[in-house]
Amino acid sequence: MTTGRSENFPIGAAVTIEGLEGDPKPILTELRAAEPVSWIPALEAWWVTRRDLAVEAMRDADAFTVDDPRFTTAAVLGPSMLSLEGAEHERHRSPFAPAFRPGILREQFDEFLGEQVAALIDGLGAGTGELRHGLAGPLAVNTITEFLGLEGVTAAEVLDWYQSISRAITNLTLGEPITPGDTAAVATVHERVQQTLDSATSDSLLVSIERTGLLRPEEMSSATVVLMFGAIETAEGMTANVFWHLLTTDGAWATVAADRSLLANAIDESLRFEPAASLIDRYTTRDVELGGVEIPEGELVTISLLGANHDPALFDDPHRYDLTRANARQHVTFVQGPHACLGLHLARMQTAAAVSAMLDAAPNLVLDPDTSSAPAGLIFRKPDRLSVTW
Ligand code: HEM
């Protein structure tokens, strides 16, 4: 059946995973123009690359769902807001929503983030350093560790768990066995959440959510893992990508150093240009038509956020990083519809704190192109290294 499909979607038939991992913009441009909903045999998935169709699909959870047994994240983490729809999704998500409101986050995190970035920048070295592993990565881990407030748990442990869970999901996706060590990591998170809930003295967010009675302990525990999972690689990539864009676009670093009012838009333009999580997956619940293409029930539909963000129908000259782009904020990097990112304000605060402190510390910062690399990756996209001097 899929061979016949490929005849109808010749551009999709030629797409390779390697092509999407490097710079996928040329391929996505071709797809969007001729096959905005295309069958990609290399990934056994339908790909959506036009912004209007991407929004249509992500808003229609009745037809395009995350609630499917093939969703490997749910198989490892247990049912959570990431893998549920409708009333159950709301029950899992709503207890966490108040803690993510901007006013509450500012009260709780402004000072924390200021101290964190100051310490991390101090640790970079004198006049030379590496910004992804030295600043963006540890900042993401330390922030979510503080947010969750698990009793006696360090950022190093959280990072370890994240790496285990990430490996487990990858192995399951590739049809490979999950190692006992990685299974144990999920069990350890569950234990540590329970210890926090049982503690009489804890002021963790989790304890206050438990008091609402909306979620059972094992559901709280899955949500904790989802928050770690949602917050580490993505926020690290987001911060690293902003540094990349500001340091590789002519004059951009100096311009923002001289006028900080440009920073918020510079961050949104980077989110548009290179979403750190570049795609989302859905499954069709029934035969459905999207952009004139009939997609049968039970199929994997991948929405390319990167593709949608470079749609020339909305963004002029879409492959140009433009600090002052008036509609940069219309990117779909944080998704629309029921699964819109819950952590977007916290993520923005982190990135702004890191970039702002670095602009203060090093208005003359330069990237070493020989030991740095452009953002890359099929799903999560970020530079491998960002070596800088100042
Ligand atoms: C503090 C950092 C972050 C936290 C705590 C966080 C948390 C979450 C949570 C809990 C969800 C699930 C919402 C739901 O299904 O109802 C979510 C969704 C999502 N987040 Fe975030 N997030 C963070 C940062 C980011 C960043 C930096 C990006 C991208 C640049 C991102 C991209 C996404 C995307 C694409 C989804 C939708 C997943 C889907 O619909 O399949 N997140 N986030």
Image (tube, grey):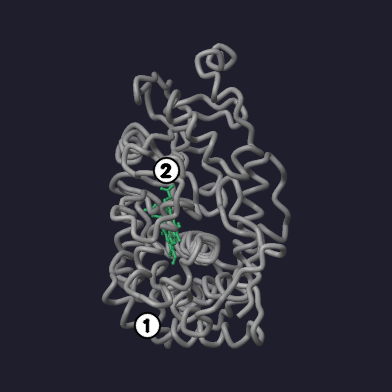
Please rate how many residues cluster around mark 2, counting C-alpha atoms within 10 Å: few if below 14, some from 14 to 19, many from 20.
many
Q: CA distance from mark 2 to mark 1?
A: 32 Å
**Res. 19 image quadrant:** top right
Q: Nearer the viewer, residue 78 or 117?
A: 117
The kind of residue on which mark 2 rests is His
The numbered disc on residue 310 is: 2
Percent across and percent down for residue 371 are 71, 65
Please provide percent x and percent y for residue 11: 54, 23
Amino acid found under the numbered disc labelled 1 = Asp
Q: Which image quarter has ligand 1?
A: bottom left
Q: Secondary structure at mark 2?
A: loop
In the picture, measured across the screen, residue 190 lies left or right of residue 33, that is right
Name the residue at 65% across, 52% down: 168
Q: Secondary structure at mark 1?
A: helix
Across and down, in percent, residue 140 comes to: 52, 71
Q: Residue at x 35, y 25 (%)?
A: 290
Q: Residue 239, percent across and down?
A: 50, 66
The mark lying in front, picked from 2 and 1, is 2
Position of the N terminus, as image quadrant, is top right
Residue 90 left/right relative to 39 = left
Does the residue tagged 2 have its C-beta within 8 Å of any atom of ligand 1?
A: no
Q: Is residue 309 above or below residue 246?
A: above
Q: Which disc number belongs to residue 322?
A: none
Q: Residue at x 63, y 73 (%)?
A: 388
Residue 237 visible in the current orientation: no
Using the image, tell me which numbered label, if any, was put on residue 110: 1
In this rendering, the answer to whether 45 lies above or below 381 is above
Q: Which image quarter is the C terminus in?
A: bottom right
Q: Is residue 293 above or below residue 230?
A: above
